[in-house]
Structures are given as structure tokens and as C-alpha cells.
């Protein structure tokens, strides 16, 4: 069942009723049962074993570390490190094997071909557990926080389990920390109609973004990328520029549904987006896009690397030889390389992700830093007003395009296809496609395109209004009649203009004639 | 408390909104078989005013004219049928109809019990979308969902906006105004055919081997039996019938005849040679196409049915004697007669044209 | 070392890391108070402080220290 389905809404309502009717101390167990049920309905039930192994290993690891610290204080550093590394490798190992084996095999096959060796290489098809990329990071963060003594281990196994598989965030995140989510799950939550309404409103907004905007944009973008030779030249760049809106409304719409659903249970998950298209630099962009993943990589990958003795020593050596600036930048760039590599490969087991959602941005950020003195000088010479709205818009557009280029690889089938798409983009300069009705042949008609444009503008206006405070709170603060009317209108918009269902085909009603 | 009250009020506003969306977005099928007019017209009939209700598919729609029957015999009837109607829907429509009417007789055209042509879910929607929401409708939709293998989900019947929302591009003024129109339907469900199909050379059939039957789907047999049982339960006389068809086999007749005999209910099959001749069916003038009767055929079929109902023990003759002249029905009859004039002329012209084209065939 | 001495030494470290001679840090100074103190500079700062005071922050402390005052508490605990 997808998040934008009636089934999910029914599931939410049923779970919610149980949650608030049963005694408050059973709430975590109610959610745990619901999460397991959700898992079985959405994923392959037997793959739950992997999730179970992760939960058990982390629970055991954290309890063991606690025991060691209490009973073997002298050897605690060494012993805890052994426990931590073992459990960490176990969890990352499951993730690596299930998700990245084929990636290794593909690369091996490529090498074999390159070296003209006569070895046949076969891929595997192992089903991974649902949301493995998300829950692994989340549960590893708990393990690490306990290892770093930032988090006290939870003694109740079921609460740890619930933290790992809390159903709203199972499929698409956000990636939470135990200090944020785990603590909330331990508390008792009273029913509040206002709270549930807020959550429901957010879910509705998520449906709007996904069904009314993202699904419709996908028709155009997919049509173009599926046939880059037929749709070459400016088509490619159009798709490239439309895709960020598509994926933003898709992913952030999904987040609205997830966060709204959690809110209905009184649980507040962390935000994953903060109007990213207003970012001035690509660095700022990734602090406002998929925020929880960025924070996770920063805290658990980049910081440990930069703080490690090796890196500090390297930095010192470089500083002595090449000066303070180089001494600071080189270790940083190497750490960032690792971070962006991880970001890329986390998204999928293909070089297109490593480049398109990883190294491309590393490159863009490095270039930005290297050319910073040059661009600062240019700005001074040209007397550019850096605080003006126009400059902000220029920076945002620039950032949008940088993101768009990387996202093109995200859409491609693989790295080679990505390069091919770009090549097709340069085959011809064909501005006539915007006036000769070509965009009406892709699956959306004139009405659809106009309505899509209106809805995108509408969503943009709401983003602007929501820059400093949730719009739904602003609405709630006004007259309740006004608020009720607004939400009914939004519901009507989603029902009428949303892209869902099998569609209405007048010809199937010819049976009316017989 | 106040919060709860305003939430309930908001919920009611939502329901109102969804109802209005349904009224606007469900297509208005007002051409051809016009299920919209048929069904809304049926609900608009005065409660407990009908003596006979016809059920079935398009063959019933074309074959029986309630206005003709009223004019001939004073019997008030309605053809509560839709195109390609599944017998499962027919069962639930009978249940629905008996909530609003207490007819003495239900006449069921048995094409739906034997027809196996693949129905699209379009036909289902034409049949069910205008049925009022009730536990009966819920049962009907769930039954359809279980028996048939369409892509449609039950939710699209209960929340029609889910199915028809793409129609926003083609909405017309009628979509908004239809809900306020007067739903009285003077044709009482009947469809008037003015085409001619005269190739069959049929004179009805004579049964040679009564054991020669055809297969029925399990669910068809099951639901036919359910209809029979339900009519018994509600103390309504059930008359099985089959309108005249240009092409017909004895297997179809025998299959239904067996069931009728087992349940001791009458089966009036117009395709039997004696009935065919008695009713005066003529393959040269009476068929609109290979499945349906035209005006001439409908007139003969209805006239024969009227006499049949009065002569046999259906409890109608007394009711007809007693009933007073009905103003609305008389007015509808006038409208019907005016409506028929150009249609009859068109049929005459079509017949003349056909004869002209085929004049050379004889030679 | 006394608390004031630690703060004085920290001023020097901050000045070097952020290339700004006018920085003075206090008990409640946080990243919001210094313009370039973002997540990347944070780790550089931590490393520089570790070097200056010959001590190590734990990874947990790196991400949970709320202000300079807390930093000073830890430094005083561990500095040699």
C-alpha cells in the first residue's frame, strides 16, 4: 500500500482509534504491533528477519556496553570498542550484502571485461527488508550514541524495536535520533482533537503536493527521458529543470504525510526539508534538502573522520609544508569526498547515484570554495548588491541548476545513459517545441498543463508564506469558519485534480448503448 | 465540547461537499439507453403506484413500452433496466425497487441469465452509479467485486469522485444543473428504436429436444434462484420472459424453462413459434438490430404482454378495474404519443429504404 | 589553569580559526553569535582547541556541547 492510498488512511484511522482507546501505557505496544502489520502489508513478511537481527544485535550491544562500563571500568574503552565495532559491522554488513552485492558484481564484471578474463559473473536477486537504508542508519545512530555515552541505553527491548520500525518513517524516513524520537515514544500521549486535526491537515497537504503536482510532472519528465532521441535538444533541459520540482513535491509531500501521520499520534518527527529552493549555495541547499540524512552523515561520518588522529596529523603535516589554508582545506575536502561518496551510494547501488547524488556536489562545493576569493573580487568590482532580492534570486537559480544537473543522473538508468541524455540535449536548439503543441502529446492535455502551472505557483506561494512558521498554524489562528473552508477547498482540489485511480475513459461506457 | 461540535460540523460540511461533487461529476447518461433518466425517473415515480415492473437489460428496454401498456390496459408499469445489466445487479435492483414500490408482478427478461459477453466496468457503473446509497448498494458493490475481475475498486462506487474526477475538463452546464431538473421520465424507461434489421427470416422456433440445454455460469444460476426466492418472499408474482430475437436457439429456451418448471413460475418466451405467431411478430418490420425490437416490435410485444397479464392469474384485472384515471400518467401518455410521431415516420422511411435496397434480392 | 585563563586562551584559538582579532568568548557564547561558526568550522574549532589544551573531546561531546561555557568545563576537567 502506498502512502497516498485510501488503504493507508484507513490503516491510520484504525491504528489511531486503538492507540487512543486502549490504556496509555500500551501505546508503544500498539504502535509496535501496527508497525509490524504495516511491514507485512507493504514489504515481504519473511524479510522482517533482517530487521529483527538488527534490532536484537543493537539492543544486545547497547546493554552489553552498559554492563561493561559498570562492571569492568578499567577495560571499558577497549571492550566497548570491540562490542561497538562488531555490532556496527554486523548491521552495515547486512545492508552492504543485501543492497550492494550486485554493485560489486557489476564492477567486478566490468573489470573482468577490461582485463579480458574468461570468468562469468552472475548477479543475485536477494530481497532486502523494507526501508533497510533508513532503519539501518537510524538504529546505528542509537548504537553510536550509546557508545559515545551521549544516550543511555533503553532497557525495554520493545521500545528499542519500536524506535527501529516506527511505521510512518519506515519507507522514506526521516532518520531520527533516539533523543528525539525514542524519548517521545516512551511518553504517554493524550488524545487532542486539535493535534489530530493539525496532523490530518498536513497529510492532506502532502497528498496535494504528490498527487496534484508531482505525479503530473512525472508524466512529462518520464516521457522525455524515456525517449531522449525523439525528445532531444531543449526537451532534455526542460525535463532537467522540471525534475527538481517533481522530486521535491514527491519527497516533501511524502514527508508531509509521514510527519502528519506521526503527529496524529502525538509524535513529532524531524523536518527533512526547509524551502530548499531558496538556498543561495549548493552547500546551503543540502542543509535544507533531506536534512536528516545530511545531519546523520555529518555527525557519524564526517566529524569522526575529521577528528580522528590520522586526519589531525595529516592536517598538521600539510600546514607545516603548505601553509595554514591548505592544511585546513585538504583534510576537509577528503572528508567531504567520503561524505559525498556515502551520500551517493546510500541512494542506490549504481555509479549514477555516486556521481549524480554525490561526487557532482562535492565537486561543485569544492569549486565554490576554491573560487570564493575570485568571485568575491568580481562582486566588489561589479558593485553587486549581495543583500538584494535580485541577487538572492540569481543565487537560488544558480543553485537550482547545479542541483538539476546532478538530478539528471539520478533519473538516468545508469551513468552511460546520463551522459547520453546530456549529449541528446545538445543535438539541436529547438525552441519551437514550446509553441508547436509537442508538450500536449506526452500524456497531458492543455487543461492539465494549465492547471499544473497554476498549482505549482500556488504551492510556491504557500512555501513563501510558510518561511517563518507553519501556514496551517496561521490558518488555525484565524476564524474557524475560514479555516474549515480552506481545508475543504484543498480536499476538493486533491480529489478533482489529483492524479490517481484508473482514470475515466468515456469509451468504456459504450455499454451504455446496449 | 465546542471543539468537538465544530469538528462534527466540519465533517458534515465535507459530506455535503462530497455529495455535491458526486452530483456534478457522475456522467449524465441521457443518450441512447439513458440509464440516468431511467433510474432517476424510477425513483421519481409515486410510491407504491406501479402494478408491474420490468427488469433485465437493453432488450427489456426496447421491448416493453409502459405507456403503450397503460394506454391498452390501464396497467401502470416501468422498465427498470440498464444496458448489459448483470443478473447480479438485477437481483439488487429488484430489492431496491421493492423498497419504493409494491408491484403485483415482476417481469424479468432472461437474457441476463444466459448472456456471457464480457462486461466492462462501464456497464456496472451505468447500472449502479445512480442507485441510492444504502446497505443494499453496499451489498451489491461487494457482490460485484467478488464475482467479477474488474480493475475498479468498490471505493469508486461509494465515492464516485474517485472514478470521475478527470471529467473536470469536460464538465458542461448540464452536469451542474441536472440535479435540479424534474426527473419525471415520460417514457418510463422504454427506449424507442426506429432502425430496421430484416435479414433474419425468423419465424420463432419449435423445441425438438427439451433436454438440450446450455451452460449457465454458477453465479448466474445462483442469482436467478435468488431472484425467484426473493419474489416469493415478498409475495410478488414473478414472470420470466424472453423478448423476440432474430436469432435464437432452443438451448436458451430449455435452460430457462427447466428452472421455471422447477420453481413453478411461468415463462413467456416470445421466441416460441406459437407465441411469435400469436403476437404477430414479423421479421421484416419488427427488429431494430440483431438483439432489439423497434417501435413495431415493441407495440406488439407490449400488447401481447398486457393481454397475457390480464388473462392469467396475476391479480391485475381487479386492480385495473378499480384504479382511477391518473392525470400525470395521462399527461405523460400525451407526451409519449407526440414523441412517437417523428420516430414512427423515421421507422417507416427506414423500412421503405431497406425494401428498396433489397428489392432486387428477390429476383 | 583558572577559568579566566582558559577563556583567554580560547579567545586566541577562536581568533586564529576565524581569522578575526576582535572575538571574545564568554560562558554563553554559541555558534549563533559568531558569523562563520558553521558545522564545518565547528569541527576545526574542536580540533584546534584539543591541540591547544592537549586534551580530547569525546565524539558525543562534540555534538552535544551547548555553549563555550560547557566547553570550558570539559577543558578544565581534562587539560594537563
Image: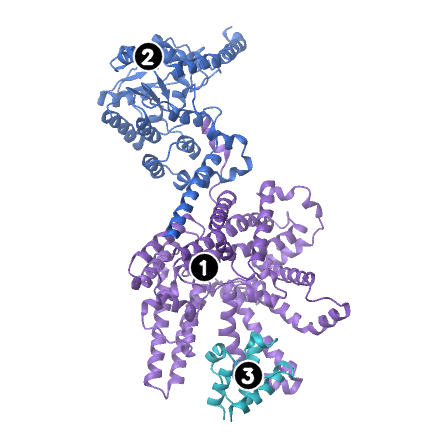
Chain colours: A purple, B blue, C cyan
User: Which quarter of the figure has residue B47?
Assistant: top left
Q: Which residue is mark 2?
A: B324
The Cα atoms of the two marked residues, 1 and 3, are separated by 38 Å
**Residue at image mark 1:** A259
Q: Badge 3 sits on which subunit?
A: C
- Side of B246 where B167 appears, left or right: right
> In the rendered image, which residue does mark 3 sit on?
C26
Q: Is residue B13 above or below residue B235?
A: below
| Residue at left offset 35%, top offset 26% | B112
x, y (%) of residue B157? 40, 38
Distance from label 1 to label 2 (Cα)?
68 Å
Q: Nearer the viewer, residue A200 or B5?
A: B5
Secondary structure at numbered mark 1: helix
Question: Both on one chain, marks 2 and 3?
Answer: no
- B361 sits to left or right of B151: right
What residue is drawn where x is 62% and y is 84%? C15
- In the rendered view, does A363 fall on the left or right side of B217? right
* Position of A302 relative to B312 (above/below): below
What's the CA distance linking mark 2 and mark 3? Answer: 103 Å
- The image position of residue B284, as x and y in percent, is 45, 10
Q: Relative to the observer, which residue lies in front, A227 or A301?
A: A301
Residue A391 visible in the displayed image: yes
Amino acid at each position: 500500500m502506498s502512502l497516498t492510498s485510501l488503504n493507508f488512511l484507513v490503516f491510520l484511522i484504525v491504528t489511531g482509534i486503538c492507540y487512543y482507546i486502549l490504556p496509555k501505557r500500551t501505546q508503544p505496544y500498539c504502535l509496535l504491533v501496527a508497525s509490524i502489520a504495516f511491514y507485512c502489508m507493504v514489504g515481504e513478511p519473511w524479510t522482517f528477519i533482517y530487521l529483527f537481527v538488527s534490532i536484537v544485535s543493537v539492543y544486545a550491544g547497547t546493554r552489553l556496553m552498559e554492563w561493561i562500563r559498570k562492571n569492568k571500568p578499567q577495560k571499558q574503552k577497549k571492550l566497548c570498542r570491540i562490542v561497538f565495532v562488531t555490532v556496527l559491522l554486523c548491521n552495515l554488513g547486512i545492508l552492504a550484502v543485501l543492497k550492494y552485492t550486485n554493485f560489486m558484481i557489476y564492477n567486478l564484471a566490468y573489470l573482468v571485461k577490461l582485463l579480458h578474463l574468461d570468468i562469468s559473473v552472475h548477479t543475485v536477486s536477494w530481497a532486502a527488508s523494507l526501508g533497510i537504508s533508513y532503519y539501518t542508519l537510524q538504529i546505528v545512530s542509537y548504537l553510536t550514541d550509546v557508545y559515545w555515552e551521549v544516550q543511555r541505553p533503553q532497557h525495554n527491548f520493545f521500545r528499542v524495536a519500536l524506535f527501529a520500525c516506527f511505521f510512518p518513517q519506515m519507507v522514506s524516513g526521516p532518520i531520527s535520533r533516539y533523543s528525539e524520537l525514542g524519548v517521545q515514544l516512551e511518553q504517554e500521549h493524550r488524545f487532542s482533537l486539535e493535534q489530530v486535526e493539525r496532523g490530518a491537515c498536513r497529510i492532506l497537504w502532502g497528498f496535494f503536493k504528490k498527487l496534484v503536482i508531482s505525479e503530473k510532472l512525472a508524466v512529462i519528465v518520464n516521457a522525455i527521458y524515456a525517449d531522449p532521441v525523439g525528445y532531444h535538444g531543449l526537451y532534455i533541459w526542460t525535463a532537467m529543470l522540471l525534475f527538481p520540482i517533481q522530486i521535491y513535491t514527491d519527497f516533501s509531500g511524502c514527508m508531509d504525510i509521514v510527519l502528519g501521520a506521526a503527529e496524529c499520534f502525538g509524535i513529532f518527527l524531524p523536518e527533512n526539508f526547509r524551502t530548499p529552493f531558496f538556498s543561495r549555495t549548493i552547500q546551503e541547499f543540502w542543509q535544507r534538502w533531506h536534512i536528516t540524512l545530511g545531519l546523520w552523515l555529518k555527525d557519524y561520518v564526517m566529524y569522526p573522520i575529521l577528528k580522528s588522529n590520522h586526519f589531525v596529523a595529516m592536517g598538521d603535516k600539510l600546514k607545516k609544508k603548505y601553509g595554514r589554508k591548505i592544511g585546513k582545506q585538504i583534510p576537509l575536502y577528503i572528508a567531504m569526498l567520503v561524505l559525498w561518496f556515502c551520500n551517493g551510494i546510500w541512494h542506490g547501488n549504481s555509479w549514477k547515484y555516486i556521481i549524480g547524488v554525490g561526487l557532482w556536489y562535492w565537486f561543485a562545493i569544492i569549486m565554490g570554495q576554491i573560487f570564493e576569493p575570485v568571485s568575491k573580487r568580481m562582486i566588489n568590482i561589479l558593485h553587486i548588491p549581495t543583500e538584494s532580492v535580485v541577487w538572492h534570486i540569481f543565487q537560488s537559480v544558480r543553485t537550482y541548476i547545479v542541483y538539476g544537473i546532478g538530478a539528471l543522473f539520478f533519473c538516468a538508468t545508469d551513468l552511460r545513459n546520463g551522459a547520453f541524455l546530456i549529449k541528446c540535449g545538445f543535438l539541436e536548439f529547438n525552441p519551437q517545441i514550446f509553441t508547436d503543441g509537442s508538450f500536449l502529446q506526452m500524456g497531458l492535455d492543455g487543461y492539465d498543463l494549465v492547471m499544473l502551472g497554476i498549482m505549482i505557483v500556488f504551492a510556491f506561494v504557500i512555501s513563501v508564506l510558510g518561511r517563518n512558521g507553519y501556514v496551517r498554524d496561521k490558518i488555525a489562528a484565524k476564524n474557524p469558519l475560514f479555516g474549515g473552508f480552506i481545508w475543504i477547498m484543498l480536499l476538493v482540489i486533491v480529489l478533482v485534480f489529483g492524479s490517481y485511480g484508473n482514470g475515466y475513459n468515456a469509451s468504456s461506457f459504450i455499454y451504455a448503448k446496449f | 465540547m465546542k471543539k468537538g461540535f465544530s469538528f462534527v460540523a466540519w465533517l458534515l460540511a465535507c459530506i455535503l461537499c462530497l455529495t455535491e461533487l458526486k452530483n456534478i461529476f457522475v456522467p449524465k447518461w441521457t443518450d441512447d439507453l439513458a440509464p440516468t433518466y431511467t433510474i432517476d425517473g424510477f425513483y421519481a415515480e409515486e410510491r407504491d403506484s406501479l402494478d408491474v415492473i420490468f427488469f433485465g437489460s437493453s432488450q427489456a428496454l426496447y421491448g416493453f413500452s409502459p405507456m403503450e401498456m397503460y394506454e391498452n390496459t390501464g396497467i401502470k408499469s416501468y422498465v427498470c433496466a440498464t444496458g448489459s445489466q448483470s443478473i447480479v445487479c438485477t437481483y439488487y435492483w429488484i430489492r431496491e425497487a421493492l423498497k419504493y414500490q409494491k408491484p403485483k408482478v415482476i417481469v424479468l427478461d432472461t437474457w441476463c441469465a444466459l448472456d456471457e459477453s464480457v462486461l466492462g466496468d462501464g456497464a456496472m457503473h451505468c447500472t449502479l452509479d445512480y442507485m441510492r446509497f444504502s446497505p443494499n448498494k453496499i451489498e451489491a458493490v461487494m457482490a460485484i467485486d467478488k464475482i467479477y475481475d474488474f480493475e475498479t475498486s468498490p471505493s469508486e462506487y461509494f465515492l464516485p469522485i474517485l472514478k470521475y474526477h478527470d471529467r473536470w475538463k469536460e464538465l458542461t452546464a448540464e452536469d451542474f444543473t441536472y440535479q435540479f431538473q424534474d426527473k419525471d421520465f415520460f417514457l418510463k424507461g422504454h427506449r424507442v428504436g426506429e432502425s430496421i434489421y430484416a435479414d433474419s427470416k425468423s419465424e420463432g422456433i419449435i423445441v425438438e429436444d427439451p433436454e438440450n440445454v446450455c451452460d449457465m455460469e454458477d453465479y448466474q444460476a445462483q442469482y436467478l434462484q435468488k431472484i425467484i426466492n426473493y419474489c416469493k418472499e415478498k409475495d410478488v408474482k414473478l414472470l420470466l420472459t424472453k423478448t423476440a430475437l432474430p436469432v435464437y436457439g432452443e438451448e436458451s429456451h430449455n435452460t430457462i424453462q427447466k428452472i421455471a418448471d422447477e420453481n413453478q413460475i411461468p415463462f413467456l418466451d416470445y421466441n416460441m413459434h406459437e407465441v411469435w405467431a400469436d403476437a404477430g411478430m414479423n421479421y421484416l418490420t419488427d427488429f431494430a438490430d440483431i438483439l432489439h425490437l423497434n417501435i413495431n416490435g415493441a407495440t406488439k410485444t407490449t400488447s401481447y404482454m398486457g393481454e397475457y397479464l390480464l388473462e392469467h392469474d396475476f391479480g391485475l384485472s381487479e386492480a385495473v378495474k378499480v384504479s382511477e384515471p391518473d392525470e400525470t400518467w395521462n399527461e405523460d401518455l400525451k407526451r409519449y404519443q407526440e414523441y412517437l410521431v417523428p420516430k414512427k415516420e423515421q421507422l417507416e422511411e427506414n423500412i421503405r429504404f431497406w425494401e428498396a435496397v433489397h428489392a432486387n434480392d428477390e429476383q | 589553569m583558572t577559568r579566566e585563563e582558559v577563556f583567554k586562551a580560547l579567545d586566541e584559538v577562536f581568533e586564529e580559526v576565524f581569522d578575526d582579532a576582535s572575538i571574545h568568548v564568554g560562558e554563553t557564547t554559541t555558534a549563533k553569535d559568531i558569523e562563520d561558526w558553521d558545522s564545518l568550522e565547528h569541527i576545526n574549532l574542536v580540533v584546534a582547541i584539543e591541540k591547544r589544551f592537549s586534551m580530547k573531546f569525546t565524539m558525543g561531546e562534540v555534538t552535544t556541547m551547548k555553549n563555550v561555557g560547557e566547553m570550558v568545563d570539559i577543558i578544565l576537567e581534562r587539560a594537563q
